[in-house]
Structures are given as C-alpha cells and as structure tokens.
Image: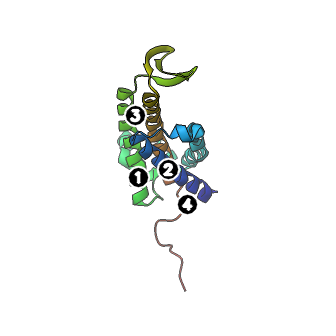
Amino acid sequence: MNKFLFYFAVTGWILGLLVHLLSLMDFDVTQQLPYIWLFGIGIFVAWIPAVIKLKHNKKLEALKNASLIKRMNPFFSLKLVFENTPTWLTIIAIGGFFYACINFILFIQVMPGQAEINNGHYYLQSHGHIIKTLTEQEYHHYQALALRGFSGHWLAFSGIAAAILYPYPTSVSSEVQE
C-alpha cells in the first residue's frame, strides 16, 4: 500500500508541477480542464496516510520527551521525519515547502480578488464586491494566477507526502548475499 501511495503522491507532484509551470506561463489550465481544482482534494489521498505514518513513528514520539534543545532543533526533527528517504527526494520535499511559502506570499501580493463570470460578463471581485470589470483575456490571466497559488501548495503537500511514504530502503541490506 505504501508503494501505491508513494506513486500516487509522485504522480500528484508531477501533475502539480506541470499545472504550475503552465500557470507561470500565464496559461489558464481551467479553460481546458475545468475540474482541475478537484486535484487539490486528491492530495489528501496521500497526505493523510503520510501524517498517520508519522504519528506511528516511535522515534518522533520519543522526541516529545527529549530535551527542549533537541525538540527545538529542526534539523534533528527533519532527520527523523525523512530518515528512510533518499537525499534527493528530501531536498525536493523541503525545497517544495519553501517554494510554496514564497509562492503564497507572491500570490497574495498579485491577486487582488477572485475572477468570476456572471451572465457572460467577467469580473474581479473580493468578498462579494466587484473590484473591476475584466476582459476575457484578463479573466484567464487571473484564473492562471489563482491556479499558480494553489498548485504551489500541491507541490509542497505531494512532495512531502512522497518523501514520507518512500517505501524503499536507502542503504544496502545487511542480508548475506549468495
């Protein structure tokens, strides 16, 4: 089951990266795939088992009783979380997390509201108030921006889930080989 969830998370990460790159090129993926937003729900298929796996990690549980200095050391905690994960996948997961944070800050700065269509007219609105009327091109621009904001989180959640659910040993087995 771990292998399935791992590959599910990797597939999610690849699809999230593709959507994210397209949105960075100002391409409105929702125009071709209107249900792409449901992808955000699919992330939890791998994310919830990853969290459950961490909850059952005895070394992380023991960390709760460790000294304050050890508990406050993020490198020690990350080492426990990603102890069975190859370095390259750990870098992708942690890098994806930081990228999602930066992407979210940029998203907040450039996205003044939500693009909507009402009776064939395009609007940018915030909290139910129309900010401005949009052209169709502007509407698709704002849809691409919104998707960029969300797909950055898809990358982070899928990457971290894949790293936690990595099902293979990272070192050579100690079994005697004949």
Q: Is residue 150 above or below residue 115?
A: below
Going from the N terminus, do you reach mark 1 or mark 2 first? 2
- The residue under label 1 is 92
Tell me the quarter of the image containing the N terminus: bottom right
Going from the N terminus, do you reach mark 3 or mark 4 first? 3
Instruction: Compare residues 118 and 109 and report the one nearer the observer.
Output: 118
- The residue under label 2 is 13
- Residue 110 at x, y = what percent? 36, 28
Q: Are marks 1 and 2 in contact (CB under 8 Å)?
A: yes
Which residue shows up at 39% across the image and 41% down it?
24
Give the numbered dot on residue 167: 4
Circle 4 — which element? loop
For this orientation, the residue located farthest to the bottom is 178
Q: Nearer the viewer, mark 4 or mark 1?
A: 1
- The residue under label 3 is 104
For this orientation, the residue located farthest to the top is 129
Residue type at tag 2: Trp
